[in-house]
Every structure is written in C-alpha cells, then in structure tokens.
Image: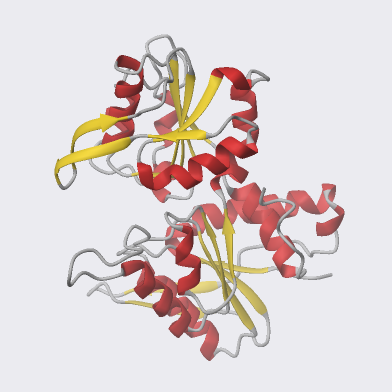
C-alpha cells in the first residue's frame, strides 16, 4: 500500500484535515485511490516562544519520502511554512510539495510605481530557497505568478470548485445569464467561467477611482438589462467592490439579479456585514481557502429577511484531495481541474 505523507502548519490544519478525510473516502469509491494506505496528518511539533519566534520538529522519519505541506503565505503565516520546509529538507526528505490554499501577496504580481516591490515574486523566491520541489495552489490572482517559480506549479482554477453549483444556478437557461467581472483585471477569469458554462462571453466593469481604494464611478458598456448576473472574482477583501458592483448592475444597468462567486474570502474590515446588508446581492458562494471562514461558524445563521441563506461555503477539499492523489501517482490533473 502507498502512503500519502501530509503535514500542515497550524493555519491550514482545518483544511488539511478535511483533505485527508476526503482522500480516505475516495479510497472506497475511486479505483485510483484504492492502493493508498489509510491517510492521517503527519506528526510535526510546532512551538512558539514568548518572543513569537517559531520552531518545528518532525516526530517521524521522512527520509527520502515525498511529503505534502499545507501552509499559507500571508504576513503572519509564511514563516511557519518556511521553517517546516527547511526542517524537512534538513531531515533528508525526498520531495516537498507545498499546498498553498490562498497565495498571499498575489496582488503584488507586478511592480507598482518607480520603487515598489513585487511581493508575489519574493514569496516564490523564499519558498524555492527554503527547499520546496513543487507547489499546488488555488485560483491565483494572476496566473503569471506560476512563472515566478523554477519548478512545477499545479494551479487549481476556481471553476473546478464551484462548477456543480454554477450549473444548478443556470439550470438549462443559459440565455438568461451573463458572467461579469467586477473589474477589468478579472476579465480573463470571467471569460473562462463563461466559456466553461457554455455562455456567450463575459463582461467586465471598469472602475474609476478618485483616490486609492475609493471607487468614484463604475462603467459597463454592455447591455445586461433583464439578465441574471454571475459576478466572478478570485478574492473578497473588504467587500466594497463587490457590493458596489451589485448595486450598480441592479440600479443602473437594470439587471434582474446578482449572485457572486469568490474563491478566497479574506473578509477584512466588516466585510461579512457589508455583504449581508447589500440588498442587491442575492447570494454569495465562497470556498474555505481562508481560516476566517472556518472561524465564522455562525455563517449558516446569516440569512436574508426572507430566510434564504445568503452566504454558502463550498469546500475545496474534494478537488485538492483528487489533485494530490493524481500528483502522487505522477498522473495528469486535467481530468479533475476543469
């Protein structure tokens, strides 16, 4: 029997446990997983000192093994991930695949201004330097980030997570739906969603800003009057753009309804309340790539006045389990990452 060696930082343990559970379920229903041994989270002790420095220690041999380390690359998470990679390398591990649910600093994929940094490239350099062999990540803000690594990157697109729910939404009435990006930068993603759903292209809203972070005007040249809109974005931070887009589409462009799809719910600055109180956004689908969703257990109690659940969480654990299984066997992931 083949064993999958899965480890996790503290910040992604909630998701790693779900993925392990899915892998064990697949052993009984999918022949590709039948020769895997019962999978558990590997033993790795992580300690934090009084000065907030971190150390880690693998409590079992990983010599010459292929291991998978779950971790995030945000400001407060990346050091723990780097230390786990480094410790594995120094323990003579065979290969390290880093699983990053939400790639932190992805919005810094290009240099801004004359003397600005490229945070996304720096994160890639640190992961590579620490000793990683490959990366699995979900719905990058910019697909070009894959080129920042000198090794294999398996990029899981957002559509793979939400496709079943999207097909239920459309329900054989594609002529009534339009996929829309809340900004011009997401037009490529929106077009891919639209194509996979069999719709006639996608549209994107252009934003004008009076100053950084403040939207003064939204412009959409396309006619979406009487249409049901599916807003597609990779992440929601404060929720301001999403809510303004929903209001604009309903109140100024006369759309019939607006639902939104978002892979990474960062949800800063009271975003949950802002979204729930936006009457023109009828429903929001998010994934669990961020710990914040997992912490927000009363999410199921956020309901609109007519008792319809407004925010629905769809786990990425099943797609990640299938991809890790295929990567472990050296097989293509195209059949599951569609």
Residue 2 seen by the camera = yes
Structure colour scheme: secondary structure
In the displayed structure image, the side of residue 174 where residue 300 appears, left or right:
left
The image shows residue 270 at horizontal and vertical percentages of: 25, 36
Using the image, determine if residue 329 lies above or below residue 337. below
Q: In percent of the image, x 39 and y 24: which residue is there?
A: 302
The image shows residue 175 at horizontal and vertical percentages of: 60, 19
The image shows residue 148 at horizontal and vertical percentages of: 45, 73
Using the image, determine if residue 154 lies above or below residue 305. below
Q: Quadrant of residue 244?
A: top left
Looking at the picture, tell me which residue is in the foreground, 272 or 171. Answer: 171
Looking at the picture, tell me which residue is in the foreground, 303 or 147. Answer: 147
Q: In percent of the image, x 46 and y 63: which residue is there?
A: 144
Which quarter of the figure is the N terminus placed in?
Answer: bottom right
What residue occupies the far front of the structure in this picture? 221
In the displayed structure image, the side of residue 121 where residue 29 appears, left or right:
right
């Amino acid at each position: 029997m083949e064993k999958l060696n899965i480890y996790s930082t503290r910040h992604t343990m909630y998701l790693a446990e779900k993925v392990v559970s899915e892998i064990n379920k697949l052993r009984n229903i999918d022949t590709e997983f039948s020769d895997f041994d019962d999978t558990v989270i590997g033993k790795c002790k992580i300690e934090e000192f009084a000065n907030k420095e971190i150390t880690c220690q693998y409590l079992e041999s990983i010599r010459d093994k292929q291991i998978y380390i779950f971790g995030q690359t945000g400001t407060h998470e990346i050091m723990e991930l780097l230390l786990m990679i480094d410790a594995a390398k120094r323990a003579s591990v065979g290969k390290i695949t880093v699983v990053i649910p939400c790639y932190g600093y992805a919005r810094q994929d290009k240099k801004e201004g004359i003397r600005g940094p490229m945070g996304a490239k720096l994160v890639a350099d640190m992961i590579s330097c620490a000793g990683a062999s490959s990366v699995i990540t979900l719905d990058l803000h910019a697909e070009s980030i894959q080129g920042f690594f000198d090794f294999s990157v398996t990029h899981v697109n957002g559509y793979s997570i939400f496709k079943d729910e999207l097909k239920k939404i459309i329900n054989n009435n594609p002529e009534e739906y339009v996929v829309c990006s809340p900004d011009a930068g997401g037009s490529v993603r929106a077009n891919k969603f639209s194509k996979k759903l069999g719709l006639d292209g996608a549209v994107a809203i252009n934003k004008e800003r009076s100053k950084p972070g403040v939207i003064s005007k939204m412009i959409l040249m396309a006619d979406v009057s009487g249409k049901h809109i599916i807003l597609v974005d990779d992440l929601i931070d404060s929720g301001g753009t999403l809510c303004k887009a929903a209001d604009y589409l309903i109140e100024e462009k006369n759309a019939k309804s607006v639902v939104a799809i978002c892979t990474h719910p960062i949800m800063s600055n009271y975003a949950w309340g802002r979204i729930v109180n936006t009457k023109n956004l009828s429903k929001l689908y998010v994934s669990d790539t961020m710990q914040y969703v997992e912490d927000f257990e009363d999410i199921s109690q956020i309901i609109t006045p007519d008792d319809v659940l407004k925010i629905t969480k769809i786990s990425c654990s099943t797609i990640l389990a299938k991809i890790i299984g295929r990567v472990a066997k050296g097989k293509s992931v195209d059949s599951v990452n569609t």
